[in-house]
Image (cartoon, rainbow, N blue to C red):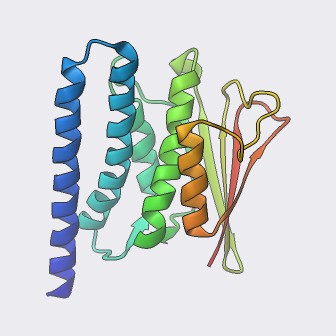
């Protein structure tokens, strides 16, 4: 009974989030200012990234853990839906089917949603876009590396001084996870590292 109730709770939370997303979309459709429309779109994707966690929990026999490899593959395509005929964005996700508990899944979902949205924002040609995410777990420590082939970081970038809302969300969620993060400089594209200790 507890399992059934928990699954139903996830289903209802997901539905409520999608209703909220739908309301934002309706507002977005009435907006004439392009920059405001973009803000609505970004907000919807943040909500979608959380709703997808609850959908994954409802759709499997797991009650408290998310298969994050499957989640990320779906999140990447969800972010690029509607672009050039819903084209599939080349991506490599090597998470070794690592299961993530719900209290970590939602902060991680928001972090990776921002990283993927950044690729979408700066991509010149979506057909040439590639995202690679790898994760290794050794002795209770999980190291996750996100890499894209975009323009990379601007000169003088400092995560603590960045005014970007996306960077602020990443920083805040990393603090919630008590994770160490780093944007690696000197390599092609963006390289983001996150170290999560159990």
Q: Residue at x 34, y 30 (%)?
A: 41
Residue sitting nearer the eye, 118 or 63: 118
Percent from the top left, x then y, of residue 27? 20, 28
- Give residue 53's quadrant in the image: bottom left
Residue sitting nearer the eye, 40 or 196: 40
Q: How many marks?
A: 0
Res. 71 in view: yes
Task: Determine whether, in the image, residue 138 is placed left or right of residue 76.
Answer: right
| Residue at the limit of the structure toward the bottom, as seen here | 1
Percent from the top left, x then y, of residue 46? 38, 44
Q: Residue at x 21, y 82 (%)?
A: 3
Task: Determine whether, in the image, residue 24 is placed left or right of residue 111.
Answer: left
Quadrant of the rendering where the N terminus is positioned: bottom left
Residue sitting nearer the eye, 174 or 71: 174
| Residue at the limit of the structure toward the right, as seen here | 186
Q: Residue at x 21, y 77 (%)?
A: 6
- Give residue 131's quadrant in the image: top right
Q: Residue at x 23, y 41 (%)?
A: 21
Res. 95 in view: no
Quadrant of the rendering where the C terminus is positioned: bottom right
Percent from the top left, x then y, of residue 9? 18, 70
Task: Determine whether, in the image, residue 32 is placed left or right of residue 15.
Answer: right
Percent from the top left, x then y, of residue 4? 15, 79
């Amino acid at each position: 009974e507890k399992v059934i109730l928990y699954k139903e709770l996830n289903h209802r939370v997901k539905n409520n989030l999608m209703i909220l997303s739908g309301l934002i979309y309706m507002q977005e459709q009435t907006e004439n200012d392009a920059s405001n429309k973009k803000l609505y779109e970004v907000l919807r994707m943040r909500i979608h990234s959380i709703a997808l966690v609850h959908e994954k929990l409802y759709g499997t026999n797991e009650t408290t853990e998310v298969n994050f490899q499957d989640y990320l593959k779906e999140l990447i395509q969800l972010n690029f839906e509607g672009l050039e005929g819903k084209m599939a964005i080349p991506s490599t996700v090597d998470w070794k089917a690592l299961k993530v508990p719900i209290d970590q899944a939602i902060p991680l979902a928001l972090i990776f949603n921002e990283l993927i949205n950044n690729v979408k924002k700066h991509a010149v040609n979506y057909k040439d876009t590639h995202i690679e995410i790898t994760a290794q777990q050794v002795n209770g420590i999980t190291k996750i590396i996100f890499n894209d082939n975009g323009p990379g970081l601007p000169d003088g970038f400092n995560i603590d001084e960045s005014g970007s809302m996306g960077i602020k969300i990443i920083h805040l969620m990393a603090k919630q996870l008590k994770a160490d993060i780093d944007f690696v400089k000197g390599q092609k594209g963006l390289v983001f590292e996150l170290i999560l200790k159990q």
